[in-house]
Image: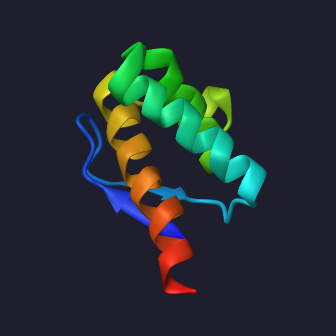
Amino acid sequence: MKIQIKGENKKKIEVEVKSLNLDDRGEFNDIYTKATFGDLKWSLFAKSVLLATELTEEELNEYTDVDIINIAKECYSIVNKKKLKK
């Protein structure tokens, strides 16, 4: 599923969110939850985005820190809402 968010330095960021299997979804949620409620490490947000999208490290590095956190938040919503729709 393609998502669009407003970026800090770019007008629009488009990212394809992968359809995760149960193991990958669990890993994504573990990383994202730890980043949000635990260690609050920016690197964990970046890892969660890399897991949930087709972005490479090089592509992800083009975005600001705030952009990456916002992409991670949107991925969290999509990864978990997909499961509710089925």
Residue 40 versus residue 32 in the image, above or below: above
Q: Quadrant of the C terminus?
A: bottom right
Q: Residue at x 51, y 68 (%)?
A: 2
* Image x and y of residue 3, in percent: 43, 64
Q: Residue at x 40, y 33 (%)?
A: 68
Residue 50 versus residue 73 in the image, above or below: above
- In this rendered view, identify the residue nearer to me: 76 or 54: 76
Q: Answer left or right for 57 relative to 41.
A: right
> Does the rendering let one see residue 53?
no
Residue 3 versus residue 85 in the image, above or below: above
Q: Residue at x 54, y 43 (%)?
A: 29
* Image x and y of residue 11, in percent: 25, 50
Count of number-bearing discs: 0
Q: Residue at x 46, y 53 (%)?
A: 75
Q: Answer left or right for 35 relative to 44.
A: left
User: Looking at the image, what colour scheme do you see?
Assistant: rainbow
- In this rendered view, identify the residue nearer to me: 65 or 48: 48
- In this rendered view, identify the residue nearer to me: 2 or 18: 18
* Image x and y of residue 6, in percent: 25, 51
* Image x and y of residue 32, in percent: 48, 35
Which corner quadrant of the image does residue 38 belong to? top left
Q: Answer left or right for 6 relative to 36.
A: left
